[in-house]
Image (cartoon, grey):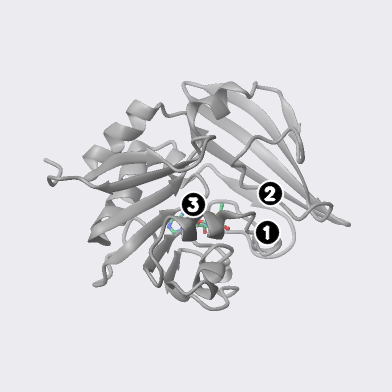
Amino acid sequence: MSPNFGTGPGAITADGCAVEVYARLAPAGVPELIHEHTAAGASVLDLGAGVGRIADPLTDMGHRVVAVDDSRDMLARVRSATTVHCSIEHLRLPDRFDVALLVSFLVNTPDADRRRAFLATARHHLAPAGAVLMQWHPPEWFDALAAGGSYSGGARYLPGRPYAHEEGQLAATLEVESITDGVLSAVVTYDLDDQHWTHGWQTRRLTVEDLDTDLQASGLQFDRFLTQDRTWVRAAMAAREPA
Ligand SMILES: C[S@@+](CC[C@H](N)C(=O)[O-])C[C@H]1O[C@@H](n2cnc3c(N)ncnc32)[C@H](O)[C@@H]1O
């Protein structure tokens, strides 16, 4: 059970995301980053794709994208990618992909079994030379935040944030409630004109070694960081299956 929650106008997903918020978030350069690290016309599996914020622009760039989400309300907004309604943990498609995406810090999910299930699904769907591209919160992201702190959208947001918005359109504030045993509990509020949403969630601080351990347990291996701020990680199939 996810302790996440969400409030506000429109549909809210099981993990507390507001469809109307994600429908308004700009892709913020993410499709371009993925495109840069992906062969032309590659097949891409976007796990937890939401409204297709990343999947649709990648389709426009010539990739064949399958967008997976457990929210039908999110998937209903996907424009051009192929949609699959399924939990990431249970997804077992017959197809294999050049790239599997885990965007939006899903890999920082506090529960280790769930985290490894996400990675195992990504690994299962990889073509032999395929790669997992994932966005995570590196440890320094956590270390810059304090319990009780309030961080408004704009300059005080840290790189790699999921809240990047077209300037002036959607104001976001991150309020950190607690950081206990490596798990950060926070509420993000979004304001747009007279509309107001909240999203409560938890995210776990993982070291690079922790991430590497989870990757290895899932049959993957760390390859490299794709960005200087270390929020984008490339992982490849491990030489050997996990024990
Ligand atoms: C924070 S939103 C991000 C959506 C999209 N990746 C983006 O960047 O715009 C997370 C999405 O993952 C989906 N999600 C979360 N946990 C999931 C799971 N276990 N299986 C399938 N979808 C999941 C939610 O429904 C939501 O649409």
Q: Please state which of residues 228 and 240 is positioned toward the viewer in this rendering.
A: 228
Q: CA distance from mark 3 to mark 2?
A: 14 Å
| Element marked by disc 3 | loop
Q: CA distance from mark 1 to mark 2?
A: 7 Å
Residue type, mark 2 in image: Ala
Residue marked by disc 2: 164
Residue marked by disc 1: 26
Are the residues tagged 3 and 2 within 8 Å (C-beta)? no
134 lies left or right of 188: left
Specify few, some or many for label 2: CA neighbours under 10 Å numbering under 14, 14-19, or 20 or more. Answer: many
Residue 11 occupies quadrant: bottom right
Residue marked by disc 3: 103
Residue type, mark 3 in image: Val
Q: Residue at x 39, y 60 (%)?
A: 87
120 lies left or right of 226: left
Mark 3 or mark 2: whose residue is earlier in sequence:
3
